[in-house]
Image (cartoon, helix red, strand yellow):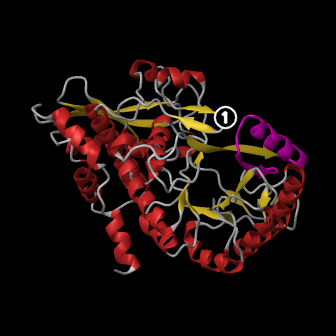
Amino acid sequence: MDRRSFAKAVLAAPAMAPAAAAQYDRRTRGLAPLTIKDAKVITTSGGRSYRWVFLKIITSEPGLYGIGSANNHYQTHAVVAALEKHLIPWLIGKDPDRIEDLWQSAHFRTYWRYGPVNNNVLSAMDMALWDIKGKRAGMPVYELLGGKTRDAVACYDHAAGRDREQALASLQKSLANGFRHVRVQYGEGGYGGGGFFPPGSGNRPEGGYTGLAFDEEQYVSTIPKVFEYIRSKVGSEPKLLHDVHSHLSGINAVEFSRRMEPYQMFFIEDVLPPEQIAWYRQIRQVCSTPQAVGEVFSHPYEWVPLVVERQIDFVRCRLAASGGITAAKKMATLCEFFGVRTAFQEGGENDPVNQMASYHVDISSTAFGIQEENQFPPVVHEMMPGTAQLRRGYLYGSDRPGLGIDINEEMAAKYPIGEIRGGGAYRTDRALDGSVVKP
């Protein structure tokens, strides 16, 4: 069997553990056939500026329902319409027990495969179905996936500073809070910090763009020096990460990775945009700096070749953007065979349901590497009982049946999604000549 055939076999493998399947059969034997009776979309700002979209699938068994995340901060209304107008009418009357069959048929239901919105819809359905199955079995979803392989899920924290002293102080605060893994960002302008010319400076076209301007070579020169300083202060024990956020291209990504090798990075993230992933082969040839990639991937054949050819070290996808628990479990299984680890993307605008779905895959997979931290305000913990707890660098789920999380719909309705200005577009950076820099 060649690598391509092996990868296809792994991706088609069933997810539910045999022992859990047997218990599920015992608990449901003699019950009336289960069907999907109804479904609804729940949206909320979470008391802040979130744009969360959840799908609630209601079954024919009284009180039995599941919750899933369709998180998409930038095309929120498109996701809501796809759920309400296309998925839900198709779901009514179907058997929620048949998760794999529903996943496959829902995937092909749109004819054109994958894509961000389709993946969000598929993910929400899939998470909700696993939630239902876990509740009906009386077990957390991770038990259905084979049980725990670790005691808790390690997470990395976020540190940043406008100069190297601030970045160091932020890192030291994370370490004092119990984190062993910390992502360190630097400088003005958010992602790409350290590579920006201040507004109005630099050699620019007359009458053109005057804002912060990103320059690849400046970034490649600046950031390694920052980590040289940080390592000189904290030593080699902390696990350091850094997110390039796809700002580099071609040979600059190769050179940046080479220059970062002495600083023993846990990984650098998305050193290349998805359009240029073939360059990871060149990176492997010149250095051993660990690579994490996949935050903006929408198709498995973006990450499958990188895994089977061992060109990367961590798959960095988001469950709600990849197809849910079913897709993530297949991803983790493939990674296990090729020595690649998972580092599911959970930060920023992400929601507690997606976080819990990631938790269940992480804690049941030997391919787990790290998960991004995300801490929610008290109002979210009240609105969504069962939201995971983050303590001293580890994430702990509720261990209740299903995903272990619920949503208070009345409370969620008190925090509607606000006006989405400019269509909700993600902010893009620009170069000195005014051209767009890939995020």
Q: Quadrant of residue 394?
A: top right
- Is residue 183 in the magenta section? yes
Quadrant that contains the C terminus: bottom right
- Tell me: residue 12, above or below residue 193: below
In the displayed structure, 298 sits above or below 44; it is below
Q: Is 263 displayed left or right of 407 in the figure?
A: right
Residue span colored magenta: 162-188
Residue at 56% of width from left, 37% of height from top? 395
Kindly state the secondary structure of the residue where label 1 is placed. loop
x then y, percent, for residue 272: 63, 67
- In the image, taking residue 386 as reference, residue 176 lies left or right, namely right
- In this view, the residue in front, 341 or 122, is 341
Q: Is residue 192 magenta?
A: no
Q: Is residue 365 above or below residue 208?
A: above
Q: Foreground residue, 61 or 90?
A: 61
> Which residue has dot 1 on it?
392
